[in-house]
Amino acid sequence: MRLPRFVSIPSSTMKRLVALTLIGVLASACLGRPASEAEGEEIYLQLCSNCHGVQLQGGLGPALGPGSNAAVQPDEFLRLAITDGRGRMPSFSSTLTEDQVGRLVSYLRREQAG
Ligand code: HEC
């Protein structure tokens, strides 16, 4: 039986690969969480805009801007959607602090007011 090809990779290459993978994992762990002092807009662009649109116009997720359903819902509804997730939207309770969720809701309110 022939050994699979990866077995013959020299160990120094392997070590380099492991190190690079670790650096990648650490970097993404840092980047995946907004800086604690990040403004609502920065957090929105980092975590929400790929589904809800850079201008809150909607995409995979519903629009959140002026005239949207979200605009006429109470703050608590927005906070709950963000912390618990809804349907295909993931929960952000372990990614965002309560403070950050508050800043995010304020940002949405400012944008909705036009
Ligand atoms: C993976 C895509 C995705 C991401 C990322 C995402 N959402 Fe959503 N969001 C959705 C979808 C899909 C819904 C609709 C869920 C349903 O009602 O079934 C939704 C619903 C919502 C709602 C309720 C809107 C309504 O009218 O019912 C709010 C508010 C919301 N998202 C805010 C956010 C915020 C703020 C972020 C960033 C922290 C975010 N979302 C990130 C996909 C996403």
Image (cartoon, rainbow, N blue to C red):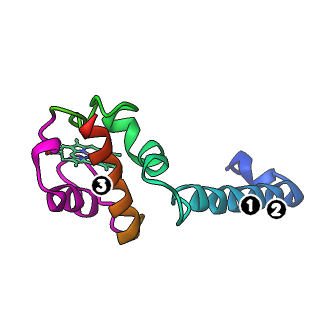
The residue labelled by disc 1 is 18
**Residue denoted by label 2:** 15
Residue drawn at x 39%, y 38% as measured from the top left? 49
Mark 3 vs ligand 1: CB below 8 Å: yes
10 Å neighbourhood of mark 1: few (<14), some, or many (≥20)? Answer: few
Q: Are marks 3 and 1 in contact (CB under 8 Å)?
A: no
User: Which of the 4 image quarters holds residue 52?
Assistant: top left
Q: Residues within 10 Å of mark 3 (few under 14, many from 20)?
A: many
Amino acid type assigned to the residue bearing label 2 in the image: Lys
- Residue 105 marker: 3
Q: Is residue 92 magenta?
A: yes
Q: For the residue labelled by badge 1, is the local secondary structure a helix, a strand or a loop?
A: helix
Q: Position of residue 93 (x, y in %)?
A: 33, 67
Q: How far across and how far down the image is residue 24, in percent? A: 67, 55
Residue 90 drawn in magenta: yes
Q: Is residue 46 shown above or below 32?
A: above
Query: Please, what is the three-letter code of the amino acid marked with disc 1?
Result: Val
Decide which of tag 3 and tag 1 comes sooner along the chain: 1
